[in-house]
Image (tube, helix red, strand yellow):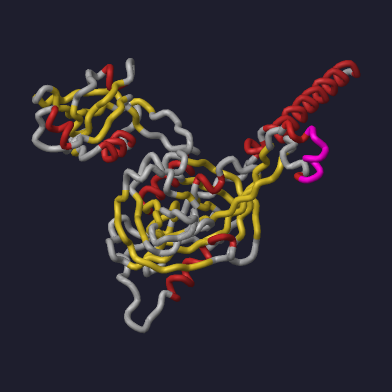
Amino acid sequence: MNLITMRKLWLLFAQSTTVALGVLFILVLFKPDLLRWQAQQPLVIQQAQSPAGAGPAAGESFAPAATRVIPTVVNVFTQQKVRSPTHPALQDPIFRYFFGDRLDGRPREVSNLGSGVIVSPGGYILTNQHVVEAADEIQVALADGRTLPARVVGADPETDLAVLKIDAGNLPAITFARDDTLHVGDWVLAVGNPFGVGQTVTAGIVSALGRTHLGINTFENFIQTDAAINPGNSGGALVDAAGHLVGVNSAIYSRTGGSQGIGFAIPVSIARQVMEEIIQSGSVTRGWVGIEVQDLTPELAESFNLKQTEGALIAGVLKGGPADAGGVRPGDILLAVNGSKVSDSASLLNLIAALKPGAQAKLTVERKQQSLDLSIRVGRRPLQRAMEPVPEGELN
């Protein structure tokens, strides 16, 4: 090999190395997540095998359940930089003297706090979406005193759930209760960090199940409890008397901002489904058919000559959407989806969302006192923004 050939090879090597280093620099600067070469730790969930206990016997306490749960609940602290609008009054030096420069348009940091639940020893944490929404920085404080940075794996505004990940292993993880174990009247414990005072356990009972039409989330099936839930409890654990996770504390109904005995938690069945889908794909995929519906009131049922108010009235059909292509028309009464009975608009929303995009679905409708089975191809539900709190309710 002569000298010229060696120089050409060396020049090619140098150029290739320079290009590779340039690409690496760009990835480090703009796409650091692409350089995570380590294998993703599998999601390991602890599942309860036995039904929940009814509660402690006379003279006993909830201490054993609280002892198991407290290490699995974390405090979530977020920082967000917001820019205040520039106010014309700041041009007045007297105004600036008395009121300062708080409206001068410079960014300021806003802090928020909430709670979260460790769901896997590998570092996955379940919390509320509104706790980490728009956060620039997220810190998680563990029960053992460690504080670690966290990143958002994914979030679902329509159920107000989010999954975080911290780089830690062998963490204490909560045990999930079975879906069918909770009943009205069962004892429950709410664990979280209310008002930032520190880890707190409160006790109450299940006041109601399947609460909907609250205007808090798009998809609602809340557990209602009188266990004290306050600002800062959001994302914390609601557990049964055995210490098994039955829900994720999410909202309160309050006129004062504090607990008034009406708190709401997202049931573990929904939380687990959303969590697993977020970890697997980064988001939640739901079915969509392009219809607008409303509940059937007795007056509407009478005007349509219906003998019962079950089902949902189709008030609008998106032109060119799946339902329109399948022959659904405004004024139809939707009675069933793939054979599953529709009781009201909330149940219909859940049935449609559970459909797989791209699949065929059978909608049973009533039109002019005749029952029709219509076949449609399910679309994918568009991503929705987070909902605003209801006027007399308050998210904590």
- The picture places residue 47, in percent across and down from the top left corner, at 38, 59
- The picture places residue 386, in percent across and down from the top left corner, at 48, 38
Which one is in front, 106 or 118?
106
Outermost residue to the right: 3
**Which quarter shows the N terminus?**
top right
Against 376, residue 153 (above or below) is below
Is 96 magenta? The answer is yes
Corner quadrant of residue 368 = top left
Q: Is residue 323 left or right of residue 161?
A: left
Which one is in front, 161 or 42?
161
Magenta span: chief secondary structure: helix
Q: How many marks?
A: 0
Q: In this view, does 33 lie to the left or right of 159?
A: right
Residue at point 45% right, 76% down? 63
Is 247 magenta? The answer is no
Give the magenta part as a residue range.
91-98
Which one is in front, 4 or 58?
58
Corner quadrant of residue 64 = bottom left
Residue at point 49% right, 54% down? 234
Task: Residue 117: tell me if it is visible.
Answer: no
